[in-house]
Amino acid sequence: MDEAPETPDLELVARTQAGDPEAFDDLIRRYYPRLYGLVYNMTSNHEDTNDLLQEVFSKAYRSIKGFQGKSSFYTWMHSIAVNMSINFLKKRNRRQAMSLDDEDAGIQNDRDFLEATTGSDPSKEANLSELQQRLNAALQKLSHEHRAVVTMFDIQGMPHAEIAKILGISEGTVRSRLFYAHRQLQNYLEEFIKR
Amino acid sequence: MAEDMDISKLLKMRRYEQPPAGHVDDFLREFHRRQRAELLRPSVREILWERLMAIAPSFRVPQLAYAAIVALAVSVSALILTQQPQQSPAVAQSAVEPAQPALSLASSKPVTIGGAVPVSTRTSGSMPSHYVLQSRPVSNEQPLSF
């Protein structure tokens, strides 16, 4: 049996604007997993991610009447999430209460991970786990703006043009931030990778 | 192990960061709870009014009354002082004008006694007034005699 076609975002938005809260629930169901990945990779903390996403959707719900469809709902939601994440990180930097011990839950499904760990060599597993921790730490050393670009491009696979729209910057700036961020990450991880 | 892994590959490993299955329902429940709580939350104006009413009884009324009276007196004084220099020259002129006819009446119609020389002419000059009797000037003042 064929699945029913997905209701377009704009239709759900229009229904929400007309006062149908269940339409917004559908939007939450649709965007929650995508935004979870984005916010988690920005914050590196599951609790913070949940709290922040509550605020993100709450803000979107309050502001949805002002959404005029000039950009896609996808871009609009991601803009809210990225901007709120950056503001949150600035505040959190002051208190430095950050946990880098969260294990990456789905990494075991990754092909690269499987290739790297086949043969169940304990030293390889230990290395990869350590590498992930180092990567977490390296990501945290990037500026919030650079981390946002890396998260959207390298982790979420968004195109440059979409990232530029979300952040309100030019594509050239996106590319230069990516270049700089990759170089920084290489430097942070150089010692580990060479060994 | 990791020599051939460039940064992009390492970062891609993180794309599996997803919430646990079924977590979205818990998230929605929490979202609805927060929305309801937000509806019940009083506005900033209500909170300010409530706080003002809470601290109002602690104000000392007599002191406030004195302060209000002093403030009123100062403001009235300031108002009066600022009003005076602002009076226009025309108004000042009109306030002086009614005095002129009275003065001119006195000068234009000199008082005469028995058709003699007008009184006003007798007092002109710098000499003190005196009467002449039998070709000798006589003062109307009593001579000092001891």
Image (cartoon, coloured by chain):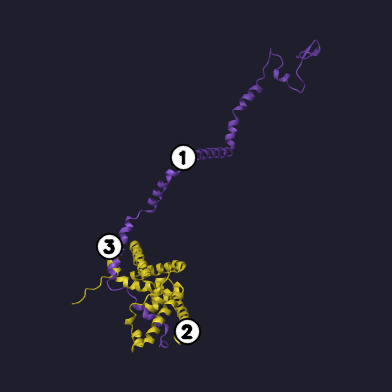
Chain colours: A yellow, B purple
Chain under label 2? Answer: A
Q: Marks 1 and 3, how far apart in space?
A: 51 Å
- Near-viewer residue (A143 or A125): A125
Residue B17 in the figure: left or right of residue B129: left
Q: Closer to the N terminus: mark 2 or mark 3?
A: 3
Amino acid of disc 2: Glu
Q: Is residue A37 visible?
A: yes
Q: What element carries label 1?
A: helix
Q: Mark 2 Cα within 10 Å, few/some/many (few <14, many 20+)?
A: few
Q: Residue furthest front?
A: A122
Pointer 1: what residue?
B61
Residue A71 picture location, percent across and down:
36, 69
Chain under label 1? Answer: B
For residue B68, above or below residue A125:
above
Amino acid of disc 3: Pro
Pointer 2: what residue?
A191
Between marks 1 and 3 in the image, the one whose residue lies nearer the viewer: 1
Where, quadrant-wise, is the N terminus of chain B in this rendering?
Answer: bottom left
Amino acid of disc 1: Val
| Residue A21: mark in rendering | 3
Q: Is residue A10 visible?
A: no
Chain under label 3? Answer: A
Q: Mark 3 Cα within 10 Å, few/some/many (few <14, many 20+)?
A: some
Residue A74 picture location, percent across and down:
34, 71
Q: What element carries label 3?
A: helix
In which quadrant of the rendered view does residue B6 lie?
Answer: bottom left
Labels 1 and 2 positioned on one and the same chain: no
Between marks 2 and 3 in the image, the one whose residue lies nearer the viewer: 2
Q: What element carries label 2?
A: helix
